[in-house]
Amino acid sequence: MVSPLTHKLLRDLWRMKGQAIAIGLVIAVGVALQVMMSGVYNSVEETRRAYYERYRLADMFAPVMRAPDRLIAGMSEIAGVAGAQGRVTGAALIDIPGQPVPVQARAVSLPDHGAPRLNDVYLTDGRLLNPSHSDEILLLESFANAHDLSPGDTLRATMNGAQRAFVVVGLAQSPEFLYTTAPGEMVPDDARFGVIWMSRSALSAAYDMQGAFNEMLLSLTRGADEQAVMAAVDDVLDPYGGQGAYGVADQFSNMFIQNELTQLEQNATWVPPVFLAVAAFLLNIVITRMVQAEREEIGLMKAFGYTNWEVGSHYFKLILTIAIGGALAGCLLGIAGGRGMVEQYLIYFKFPFLVFQLDPRSFVIGVSVSVLAASAGGILVLRQVFALTPSQAMRPPAPPDYSRSSKLSGVLARYLDQPTRMVLRRITRQPLRMAGAMFGIAAGMALSSGMLTIFAAFNHTIDLTFTVENRADISVAFVQPVSDKTLFELRNHPGIHAVEPMRSVSVVHHNGRFSERGAITGLSMGADLYRAIDANEQPIAPRSDGIILSTTLARKLAIEPGDMLTVEVREGRQPVLDLPVVGIAEAFLGMPAYMEIDALSRALGEPGHVSGAYLSIDDAFADDIYRWLKDLPVVAGVSPNAQAQAAFEKMLNEGAGAVRYVMGTMAFIITFGIVYNAARIAYAERARDLASLRVIGFTKGEAAFVLLGELGLVTAMALPIGALGGHYLSLLLARAFSGDLFHIPVLFSPESLGFAGLVVIVAAIVSGVLVKRDLDRAELVLALKTRE
C-alpha cells in the first residue's frame, strides 16, 4: 500500500517535473563528464599497457651511428638488462604515383628468422616477410589505407640515395608507432608519413650496415636502475657514435600517448567537479524555495501527526530522487559519450583495438558526489522543516521589514509605473534571494564563457602557429647536416622566392635536478619565414650569446632568463654546452629552444652546416618544385605548411581536441537549465500574487512583466559577474587542455564573452516564454483558492 507521503512525493515530482528534469539534467551532465573522461582514460591506459606487454615494446632505446653486432651479447650482461636486440633503421622517401609531394617514411628492420625479441609487429593483413626476397616489405596499415595500398601492390622508395621498387606483402601495426609524425613535426598525418618494415639482411644492404646496427633495443629487469643502465650502455656505444640512450618515457610515440593520458586525467580531475558544484548549488536553491513555499503544507502534515523525521524524510526523498535520477542518467550519457570519444582516439592513436572500458570508480564517484552535494544542500533546508511547529507553519510568515526601503519607494513612486516599482521592490526587499538567483545564472554564464574562450584559444593557437610563427610555404629537411652552399642551389631554382637556413640538433637540457630531451633550432638573424615570438606575439631575434626557451620548456626545467642551462648535445661530436638563457618565447606546439644558427654551428664544431631550410615559393611552380626536391638525394623530407596546418586543425577538431565540443555543449545545457530553473522558481513563488494581480485588473502582459522583469533584471546583473567568473574558469580549463604537445593560451576574447552573454539572454527569453505560457493558462480561481 502506498503511503500518503509517497502519494505526495509523486504528485510533487509531477508538479515540478520541468524543474526536476532541468536540475537532473545539470547533475547528469556533470556525472556524464566524470564517467566519460575516466572511462576513456582507463580504456587508453589499459589498452596501451596490454599492447606494450603483448608485443614486447623495449624499455630503452639507444641510437648509434654504426656499431658491430658483436656488442649485442655484451649488452645483455649489463646489470639490469633482461634482453638486447640490435636493428637497422633509416629515413626513406616514398614516391606515390600522381602525387608531386614526396612522402617521408622510416624503414625498420625485422630479424630474418623468427619474431623479434623486442618491438614485435601486429600483422593486420597479408603475410610476414620472406627473408629470401629482399624486395618484400610490410607497410604501416594507416599509411596504406591513406593511399589505398594493399598486399600485392608495388611501391617505389628512395633509401640511402638509391630508389628501389618493393612489393607490399602485408600491413602491420606496432606499439612503437601508435602516434606517427613526419620527422620535425608534431602533428600526425597518415598520408604524409609511413613506416616500412624490411628483413634485417635487406635493410642492412640498403644502408651499408652489414654486420652492424644503428639502434639498440633493451628490456630491463624488474626494479632495474634505469639511469645506471643508460650510463653503461652509453659507455659501450660512445666509441661508435652513440647518441645517448633514453627510456620508453622519452620514446616519441609513447611520449604523446602519455601526454594525452595526462590531459585526460587533468580534465577528469578538474572539470566534472565544476559542473557538479554548479548543480549542487542549483539544487539547494530550488529545494530551499520549495520548502519555504510549502510552509503551510508542512504545518498541516505535522498537525495530522507526522513527526519531524517523517516530514523531513519526505523532502529528503524528493532531493535524492532528483539527484539519483540525474546521476543515473549521467552514467548512461557518459557511457554513450565515452564510446564516441574512443572512436575519435582511434583516428590518431594506432591501437589495433580500443574498447571503451568502464571504470566502476567513476560511477561510484559520480553518484556519490551528486548525492552528497544534494544532501548537503538538503540538510540545510531540512533544518527549517524541523524548526517549524504546526501552529507556526500554518500561519502565514511574518511580513518582512521593508522600512529601510521607504526612501527608495518614494523615489520610485515619482518616476516609475506600478509594475516596474513592483519588480524593483522585489529585488531590493529580498536581496539574499535575488543574489542566489543572480549567482546561479552567473555560474552558467561563467561555464559558457570559459568554454567559448577555450574555443577561441584553440583557433588563436592555429593562427599564431601557422601564420605568425611559421610563415614558410615549405619546410625541407636534409638527410644529414650539409654545407650551406646547398641553399644556393635551392635559391636558384625557378619559383623559389626565398630560402632561410635551419639547423636542428638533438639535445638533453639540464638544469640541476631537472632535465628534458628536446632539440635546439638554429635560425638566422633576421629570419622572416620561421620566427620565435614573445608573449606579445612580436618576433624575437635569435641570439648568438645564449639560448631562447619556450615557456613550456622553461617551466619544466624551472629556469628563468639570466640562469645558465647545460645542454648535452646528442649528435656529431656531442659537446656539452653551458648556455645562458637570454629569453622566453611563446610556443604552442612542442617545447622548442632557439639559437642564432652560426653560433649554434660554431658550438657544435660544424660551421656552415644546415640541416634544413624554409622556403617561400610561387604556387604556380609548386608541383615542379616538389618533383625537383623529390629527386634531390640530400632531401629527407618535404613538408608543405598548408598540409601541416590542415592536419593540425583536423587533429584538434576530430581527435582528442574534440572533447572541448562535448564540454561546450554540456555547458550550454547547464546554462539553460539554470536560467529555466530561476524562472520556474520565481513563478512558483509568485503564482498566487500574480493571480491576484489579474483578478484586481492587471492585464496578462502587466502580470507577466512583474514576473519576467525580475528575471530580466537578475539576468542583466548576473552577466558581468559571469564574465568575470568565466575569465578565471578559462584559466583552469586552459591548464587542463594544455600539455607537452600543444599549449593553449588564455585569451581575453570579447567575442566569446558576447556570445556567452547571448546564450544566457536567449536562455532567459526562451525560459520567459515558457513560463509566460503557463502564467497565461493559469486558472485564477484555482490559484486563489489554494491560499484558503
Image: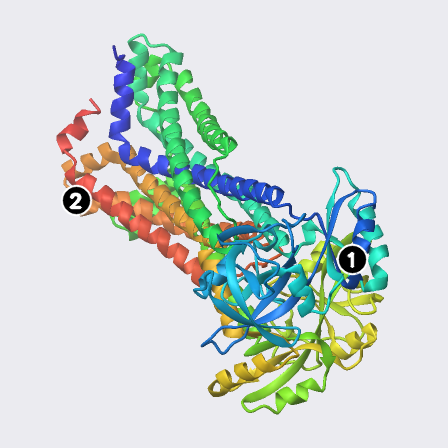
Comparing labels 2 and 1, the label whose residue is closer to the camera: 1
In the depicted view, which residue is nearer to us: 728 or 395?
728
Q: Is residue 531 in view? A: yes
In the rendering, at what x and y percent does residue 703 appear?
A: 21, 43
Q: Amino acid at mark 2?
A: Lys
Q: Is residue 457 in view? A: no
In the rendering, at what x and y percent does residue 526 appear?
A: 68, 82
Residue in view at x 35 percent, y 24 percent: 318
Q: Quadrant of residue 331?
A: top left
In the depicted view, which residue is nearer to us: 503 or 243?
243
> As displayed, is residue 711 above or below residue 379?
below
In the rendering, at what x and y percent does residue 598 appear?
A: 77, 79
> Which is nearer the N-term, disc 2 or disc 1?
1
> Quick one: quadrant of the C terminus?
top left
Residue in view at x 35 percent, y 16 percent: 392
The residue carrying pointer 2 sits among few (fewer than 14), some (14 to 19) or many (20 or more) residues within 10 Å by Cα, namely some
Horizontal side, residue 393 vs residue 562: left or right: left
In the depicted view, which residue is nearer to us: 86 or 5?
86
Residue 700's disc number: 2
> As displayed, is residue 112 above or below residue 425?
below
> Quick one: quadrant of the N terminus?
top left
In the depicted view, which residue is nearer to us: 129 or 138?
129
Residue 788's disc number: none
Q: Amino acid at mark 1?
A: Asp
The residue carrying pointer 1 sits among few (fewer than 14), some (14 to 19) or many (20 or more) residues within 10 Å by Cα, namely some
Image marks 2 and 1: residues in contact by CB distance under 8 Å: no
- List the residue tagged with mark 1: 69
Horizontal side, residue 762 vs residue 547: left or right: left
Asked which secondary structure carries label 2, the reply is helix
Asked which secondary structure carries label 1, the reply is loop
Q: Quadrant of residue 145?
A: bottom left
Marks 2 and 1 sit apart, C-alpha to C-alpha, by 92 Å
